[in-house]
Image (tube, rainbow, N blue to C red):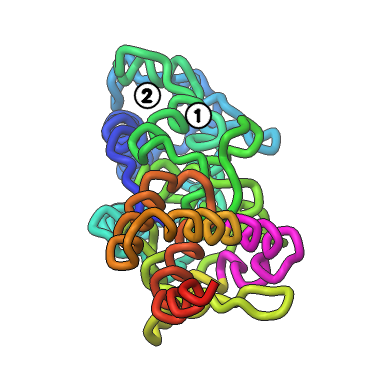
């Protein structure tokens, strides 16, 4: 719903990209070019010292996923993939990251070898995001954690306490602030550590049964490039609220479907919460109408609404008083 920015985290995670990820990818390709085929870690460590910065955090290669260490996953890649295939994966990695950095999130899913998926998604993202050794090597000047990501994201986006994806649930509690991959890492592991793909979200948006989960669709608008809430219409029906694009747009339709927003606004809890918030605004509006001229009422109310964006259902309320304002004012003058 909300257009967001993530430049503070982007600066930090771009350093991880340039000092950890790119050298690691190049290291794998160089091993293949050198026809490396030894299996014990002592020999592998010698290659690390020859081909990488001597201070590169070697602990990465010993991190396990499903009982298999990173360096063994690399050995599996060397045994199963040709040099051209590895170079093609590097091109895909560069292309996908360049695309979303340019604001294009309508990417087609391409096959990534399981070993690369596990290295990028389960080791670099899941294990190294909070790894002190990695951040000491990168020399950011501090130890970076997921809590730092959330603090940076919220500060940059006006300390918003409402989920930017749905504008209904809060992200105040620590347990309800998820580092969500807009393009899911199970399908786009090479974007696992790109800040332009990471957003603080509520639990509902993160879960498959209520939100996007691990799904992806194409084409789609992203909150990193568009304020989607300004381009949708809310319709109040009996016991539910339906949402449609303001103008026919498959990219918005896909966003609404991916986040299951029509399903969510049809639930009793979300419907009731939204109506309660709307009724509170109507009551405030009616009180203001006794003090302010009709001509000045809308601009005053709109400015007041803008100052309280963190209260939730902002786009729902803005839509109601915007699209239905003429009819609403006719009803108000008869009270």
At which x and y percent is residue 160?
Answer: 44, 40
At a point 48% along the width and 29% down the height, the residue shown is: 129
- Tell me where residue 149 appears, x and y as whole percent: 44, 31
Residue 202 is labelled as none
Would residue 52 appear left or right of 236 to someone viewing this image?
left
Q: Is residue 161 left or right of residue 136?
A: right
Q: Quarter of the image holding residue 34?
A: top left
Residue 48 disc label: 2
Instruction: From the image, give the main secondary structure of the stretch colored magenta.
Output: helix
Side of 264 where 149 appears, left or right: left
**Helix, strand or loop at disc 2?**
helix
Please give the residue where the numbered disc 1 appears in the rendered image.
146
Residue at left offset 56%, top offset 68%:
258
Q: CA distance from mark 2 to mark 1?
A: 28 Å
Quarter of the picture containing the C terminus is bottom right
The magenta stretch is 258-277
């Amino acid at each position: 719903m909300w257009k967001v920015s993530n430049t503070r985290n982007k600066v930090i995670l771009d350093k991880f990209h340039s000092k950890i990820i790119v050298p690691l990818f190049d290291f794998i390709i160089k091993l293949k070019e050198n026809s490396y085929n030894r299996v014990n870690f002592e020999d592998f460590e010698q290659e690390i010292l020859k081909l990488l910065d001597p201070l590169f955090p070697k602990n990465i290669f010993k991190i396990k996923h499903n009982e298999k260490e990173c360096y063994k996953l690399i050995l599996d890649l060397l045994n199963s993939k040709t040099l051209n295939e590895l170079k093609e994966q590097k091109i895909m990695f560069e292309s996908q990251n360049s695309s979303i950095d340019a604001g294009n999130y309508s990417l087609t899913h391409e096959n990534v070898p399981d070993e690369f998926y596990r290295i990028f998604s389960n080791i670099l993202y899941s294990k190294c995001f909070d790894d002190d050794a990695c951040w000491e090597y990168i020399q950011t000047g501090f130890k970076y954690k997921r809590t730092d990501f959330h603090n940076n994201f919220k500060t940059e986006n006006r300390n918003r306490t409402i989920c930017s994806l749905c504008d209904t649930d809060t992200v105040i509690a620590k347990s309800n602030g998820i580092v969500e991959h807009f393009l899911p890492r199970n399908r786009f592991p090479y974007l696992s550590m790109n800040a332009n793909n990471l957003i603080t979200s509520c639990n509902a948006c993160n879960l498959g049964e209520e939100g996007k989960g691990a799904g992806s669709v194409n084409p789609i608008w992203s909150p990193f490039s568009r304020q989607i809430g300004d381009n949708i219409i809310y319709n109040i029906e009996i016991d539910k609220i339906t949402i449609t694009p303001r103008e026919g747009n498959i990219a918005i339709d896909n966003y609404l479907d991916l986040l299951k927003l029509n399903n969510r606004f049809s639930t009793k809890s979300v419907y009731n919460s939204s109506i309660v918030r709307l009724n509170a605004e109507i009551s405030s509006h009616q009180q203001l109408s006794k003090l302010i001229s009709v001509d000045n009422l809308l601009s005053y109310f709109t400015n007041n609404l803008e100052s309280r964006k963190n209260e939730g259902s902002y786009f729902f309320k803005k839509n109601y008083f915007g699209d239905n304002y003429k009819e609403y004012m006719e009803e108000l003058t008869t009270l």
